[in-house]
Image: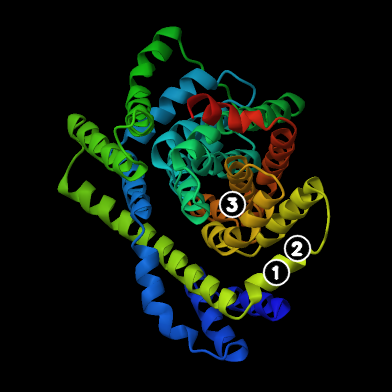
Amino acid sequence: MIATSLILLLVLLGISIPVGAALGVLGLILEPIYSMLPLSRAMGEISWSTSNEFLLVAIPLFIMLGEILLRSGLAERMYNAMSMWLSWLPGGLMHANIGASALFAATSGSSVATAATVGTVAIPQIRKKGYNESLFLGSLAAGGTLGILIPPSINLIIYGVLTNTSVPKLYLAGIIPGLLMAVLFMAVIAIACIVKPAWGGDRTRSSWHARVSSLVDLIPPLGIFLLVVGSIYAGLATPTEAAALGVVGALLLAAWMRRLTWTMLREVFEGTMKSTAMIMLIVIGAAFLNFVMSGIGLTSAITNAIAGLHVSPAVMLLVMVVFYLILGCFMETLSMMITTIPIIAPIMIGLGFDPVWLGIVIIILVETALITPPVGLNLFVVQSLRTTGSMNAVIAGSLPFVIMLLLMIGVLYWIPNLALWLPTLFG
């Protein structure tokens, strides 16, 4: 049953059926083969109950927040400010890619939005400044992954919903690992450009006066971050309400900058609707597949197979890491989370792993899936922003950052308080 399901899923994905539809179709195929009951008749109820989760309303709101920042020009000004402060390091603007991604991640909550926004502004600089194209593109793809770890994060909300874990605690747990990941990414760039100075391109020189003047462009994203995250921890708003506050704040900033036009709003609404529709199709398709898997006993079979390994928690963690690395080569991140977490999380929590800590580790593994071929979503996003060149350059440039992500999991295993200190402090 497990083998049949996996083969069918790979076939459906291989013939380019959209991921959300592929998950639903797989459920419809498995039902007549293994079930005596008409499980498909529950599809309407599952679609409604899945979409009716209040916390999920935050998803379109965070997507809209990122769209407003992009369309209003705030993201471009933020990138230029980061470039003035970080371009003196070995690697120049590649550090600005990481820094701007980390800052944008603290407002948008979306990996794809982060990679697309920073990439749109940064890619024209590759040839103009003479950077190593592959490493530069890899820094954009990797920087985008910070969008789902640094709060607010759409994926952390999904994990919280699936495991009944506190989203505010998950947000707190993601801050230190997210910032440390940004530092590790910048370390990779610096080391590579010290070894190969030609990869670092022409240094951008900025006066201290220009740097200090640019700080005003960093205030809006930081202000929105404090508005969103601060309102949650002050007890003034739920994560969904905080996302709405962020949208209102971004609209006010756009109006203050005189960028709030009907054309801009139409583009924001269109982008938000497209992304939200894609995400919700995946959520509903995965929920139906999970229902079918439970109904035919597949979930129990997988759980028993894993539990039957009788290995230590450390070995089980290693098995989980390998499992997600392999799965990330074939599945989109959101569908991978929704399909696997209901099975994996209870097993790992039962072995003694803290659910908040486990959430951060799984998010880092999902980040890794975003930049591993052939289905790494951020790889496609960065490639789509280019006018020439093959995907191979983006893939090759992302590999050093994959190593850093795996290193981060090892660090979290040995020092779990990196993720748990803030939730404990403010809990």
Q: In this view, does 148 lie above or below 331?
A: above
* Front residue (pair 260, 326): 326
**Percent coordinates x, y for residue 238 in the rendering:** 33, 41
Q: Name the residue under label 2.
A: 306
Residue at image location 61% in from the left, 34% down from the top: 131
| Crowd around label 2: few <14 · some 14–19 · many ≥20 (10 Å) | some
The secondary element bearing badge 3 is classed as helix
Q: Are marks 1 and 2 in contact (CB under 8 Å)?
A: yes
At x 57%, y 28%, the residue is: 176
Q: Is residue 339 above or below residue 114?
A: below
Residue in the foreground of this view, choosing between 374 and 88: 374
The first of marks 2 and 3 along the sequence is: 2
Numbered label attached to residue 302: 1
Residue for badge 3: 370
Q: Where is residue 419 in the image (x, y as percent from the top left)?
A: 60, 33
Three-letter code for the amino acid on which mark 3 is drawn: Leu
**Residue at the (68%, 56%) spot, across then down:** 347
Name the image quarter holding the N terminus: bottom right
Q: Can residue 204 be seen in this view?
A: no
Q: Earlier in the sequence, mark 1 or mark 3?
A: 1
Q: Disc 2 to disc 3, how far (Cα)?
A: 25 Å
Q: Percent position (x, y) of residue 58?
A: 35, 49
